Amino acid sequence: MTRAIQFIKEKQGLLKKLLSILILIAIIVLTRLEFKSIDILSLRSLLRSLSLTEQAIILLLGLAAFSFTAVYDIILSKYFKLALPLKETFKIGWTAQAFNNFIGFGGLTGTSLRFSLYKKKQVSDAIALKIGLSALVSPIVGVFMLVLLTIGNLGKLQGHKYGSLLLLICLYVPFYLFSGKLKLGRFIDEHSPFVYLTLKVKSFILLVSTIDWLAAALFFTYLVKLYESSLTYPIGILIYAISTIAGIASFLPGGIGTFDVACIYLFSQLNYDTNGVILSILIYRIVYYVVPWLVALFIMLIDFLREKTSLISRNVMMQIEVKALSFSVLFGGVVLILSVDTPDLVSRVHLLEEIVPKDAQNFSRITTLIIGILLIVLSKGLRERVKTIHHISIGLLLIGAVTCLIKGLDYEETLLMVFFAGFLFFARDYFTNQSMEHTKSSIAATIGLVTGLPLIYAGIYNATHGISFLHDTGAYSFVYLKENSWKFLVYEIVAVSIALLLQYSQSKRIVFTPVSEEDVTKFEVFIKKYPANEYTHLFYLKDKNVFYNSLNDVLFLYRPTGKYLLVLGDPIGNPEHFEDAVDELLRTAQKYNMSVNFYEVEGKNLELYSNQGFSFLKIGENAKVDLSDFSFKGKKNSDLRHIRNLYTTKNFQFEVVYPPYTESFQQTLKTISDEWLKGRKEHQFSLGFFDLEYLSREPVAILSNEKGIQAFASILPIANSQSISIDLMRFRNKAPSGTMDVLFISLFEWSKKSGYHSFNLGMAPLSNVGNEAYSHKKEKLVKYAYDFGNNIYRFHGLRSYKEKFHPEWSNVYIAYREEYKLISVLLALIKISN
């Protein structure tokens, strides 16, 4: 005996392999014997008999049943006080259990994968191992409970001889609960889950495990009943439980072969058709094993891409998931509406009539229809990630689940609604947006309009059809309305609900707020600390708001319009925090379901936006004159020298005037500006417009002769830099040719003498866009617009004019997030610029 024990210990690994091979051979032999009776043509016919709706219901029921397997991790993570989001814990549980079911090895796959996944979430090795071991020994306890609950039906399977063995195996239940109290020495110590899990948590796990296995057993029995309607649920649950125990004991992946043979054998005791049973097992394995495993693979792939690459950002994934949830609710609404219009099963109707009064059934049908319509409407609010709409959607889905049962025992639709509600609940962190604010008067107006329209329609109908409201009985007379009052009441309730839900389905937006003196003071304090750019001074036009980052060392000038937040130029402030500030701006906009787009950003900063997933469209080129190289000497500037000399002989004088300005000076500038505009509307946002308060902040350069001021330009010194620019540059209609040239070169001279190194001439729109052979199609399209628009706006002339000053050109871009929204972004820019 001692030698035998010693031999077993030495050859333990080899014996395990031999045992597995013997089990596998036995399964193959038994499978061949059982599968000889299978008719492939009959099997194919049975599979094709399932409608598309039935297939969809099977898929959803299977996924709903499988989702219970993730609850163990939720319980254990709370027991071990892990600060993980519920969604992350659910994902770990789903992934580990899906791989465990699919690959098997007695639960070791799930244990090792759980350990790895929790480690990635910064959970300590000790706790991760404890959770893995707990999830190894705990879930199976529920399947033994199913045997205990249904073992009374064993006689119907001619299985009395197995009763004692099953009861012996089921002793695992009390062993699991109370083994921690027993002194079993080397077998169970403080490192065992039987010890470190308390009786309270083990009792709770026992309950959850029983529900988990019951859900799987009910799903399996439902599949068999599709082909063997005489099967009762207690028998189906017992067969499933016994077969599952056989599968677990085999240590094979998913109990493959063992589970199947056991099921076929036990159902054969009831004389059930083998083809139907085989097909049920096949569908069960696909839906309960393969599909969850594919979902787990997808989850792991997405997590891998998030960690290793920037291909799928959190924002993109959130949008995908939100859209999927929105579609699910819309689909749920359609299902509820169709369920009202489709006839109920006769067997269910007879059963229902014994339980639920007819009036309650009719009321539930109407309620189900209304909920279906409302869910379709609510799907829009879910796309906007509105928190209130999310709560309402969950409530209506659950009410819809109840009304489906009351109206016709439609448990398929009930489970579908509960399934959708569950997914919405787990994704609740996505729905953080507040709904757009509405005044009481706007709500009252909506209710009045919706309730009033039917009355207006009724009045028009009566007038055109010659119906007397008080004396006739046809539609829409007083008698008719009175007889059908409940229909109109239902209509009004639905119509008002839809209108109000549509109002509140739009998330709250960032809106333009008038610039206050406090805003100006804060802005000026900021600008004294950090280098500005050529757009900074445009803030004083008060047509833009400012976004400051949390560190208060980066700002953005922006203008909100609709769903878009349009930022002018690059960030201003501390360059070290630009990228974090852009991220902060994006997150803020996301809370309001708005898209951030940058207008007129420089090429040197493209990496800043590219890292955040932006695409780019070149919209022109910016011109800067290097004042250190500017001179009237030599051939390069001979034309400019000639113009300056010519105007000097004509007694033109250049002068820079500083504020405060006299009223007469301001009026003269206004007159020149009006002449130059010729009644045209001024542009805004990226350009300055004539505003006396705005002009009074900085010097104005003027060019005068004996007839007075002929032209002016507002000077824009760029704070904390050695650059300078201009904004408004306007001249009289009768000013001599070359007036603008003289004003420019005079400004160059003055700026150079004042210590500035560069002069910004501004952008030449659409310049050199789409000229290269391999330019993007969208840029080539912009080029055609450039060539066509030149006939109206003289774009070519603007670049040619600036070229005479020999500037350095740099590309200017729009940075935008979503390709398909580019046209909408451009239209939004046109809107705020005009």
Image (cartoon, rainbow, N blue to C red):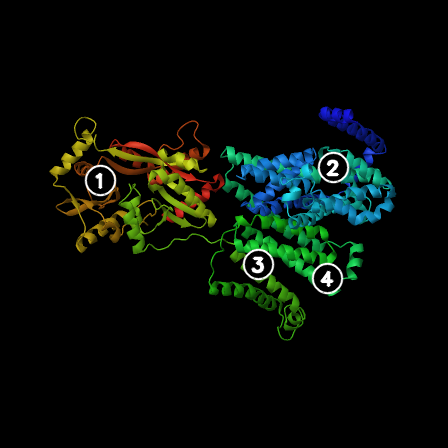
> In this rendering, would 61 be left or right of 306?
right
Q: CA distance from mark 2 to mark 3?
A: 52 Å
Residue highlighted by disc 3: 498
- Quadrant of the snapshot with the N terminus: top right
Q: Amino acid at mark 1?
A: Met
Dot 3: within a 10 Å radius of its alpha carbon, few (fewer than 14), some, or many (20 or more) residues?
A: many
> In this rendering, would 468 be left or right of 213?
left
| Rendered location of residue 637, percent (x, y) | 20, 29
Residue highlighted by disc 1: 740
Residue highlighted by disc 4: 361
Q: Nearer the viewer, mark 3 or mark 1?
A: 3
Residue toward you, 576 or 654: 576
Residue found 80% across the figure and 29% down from its top: 28
Dot 4: within a 10 Å radius of its alpha carbon, few (fewer than 14), some, or many (20 or more) residues?
A: some
Task: Name the N-terminal-most of marks 1 and 4.
Answer: 4
Residue toward you, 242 or 234: 242
| Rendered location of residue 227, percent (x, y) | 81, 43
Task: Name the N-terminal-most of marks 3 and 4.
Answer: 4
Q: CA distance from mark 2 to mark 1?
A: 90 Å
Q: Nearer the viewer, mark 2 or mark 1?
A: 2
